[in-house]
Amino acid sequence: MLTTPRLTIRPFVPEDLEALHAIYGDPEVMRYVDGDYASLQATRAALVTHVEMHEKDGFAFWAVLREEELVGEVGFGRLGDEIEMGWTFARAHWGHGYATEAGHAALRRAPAAKLLAVIHPANEGSKRVAEKLGFERSENREVRGHRQLIYKRRGANVSAAGL
Ligand SMILES: CC(C)(COP(=O)(O)OP(=O)(O)OC[C@H]1O[C@@H](n2cnc3c(N)ncnc32)[C@H](O)[C@@H]1OP(=O)(O)O)[C@@H](O)C(=O)NCCC(=O)NCCS
């Protein structure tokens, strides 16, 4: 578990399903995110992946809580041989610096020194978060069937311990 002045970051648990679906099921939140998460089934499958990946690998997308309420997720996934970092927050909680605050904390548990972020060209908020976390704009790339901007970051502390 990680804590910041306002937030707690912990691995997902199956009981997060409803709260997570309130985030994934919001088309405005998922506007620039690949994949179709409209159904509860899809959120359940993603949640199983988060839980199992953390258990197996020690990293995954993690739950971000503000006073016990699930406000978003931050964490890491695999993109081929590379490690991707990502952030997604409930619409009601945008604009408070949570993605940046949680991102800085998660970077203390990054599973690789070199990270990338895959960002839709129109996702201005996410580009700004990436920059505030020390990512720099790199190339454009086709990822999961979409033309995306790649941001790269070097020099994260690598921790085998996970959360
Ligand atoms: C992107 C997202 C995670 C940002 O979360 P957040 O907690 O509001 O982020 P922060 O408050 O830490 O920082 C957001 C920054 O983007 C800026 N921003 C937000 N929307 C913007 C826009 N449309 N144009 C320009 N800047 C924008 C904010 O002003 C802020 O920058 P500042 O601190 O310099 O003012 C959130 O909007 C979200 O969950 N979006 C949907 C999911 C998503 O797209 N995830 C990323 C996939 S790559």
Image (tube, grey):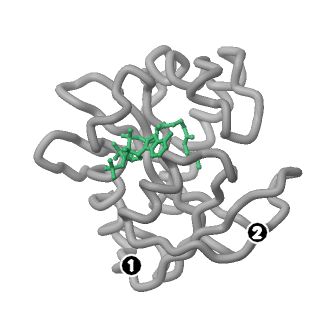
Q: Are marks 2 and 1 in contact (CB under 8 Å)?
A: no
Q: Earlier in the sequence, mark 2 or mark 1?
A: 2
Q: Is residue 121 left or right of residue 144?
A: left
Q: Is residue 149 left or right of residue 115?
A: right
Numbered marks: total = 2
Q: Is residue 110 left or right of residue 9?
A: right
Kind of element beneath mark 2: strand
Q: Please provide percent x and percent y for residue 154.
A: 47, 83
Which label number is shown at residue 156? 1
The Cα–Cα distance between marks 2 and 1, rounded to whole angstroms, is 22 Å
Looking at the rendered structure, the kind of residue marked 2 is Asn
Image-quadrant location for residue 24: top right
Along the line of sight, which residue is nearer the eye, 75 or 1? 75
Any mark on residue 140, and which? 2
| Tag 1: amino acid | Ala
| Residue at (32, 57) in percent of width and height | 163
Q: Position of residue 162 (x, y in %)?
A: 37, 63
- Residue at the location (18% across, 49% down)? 3
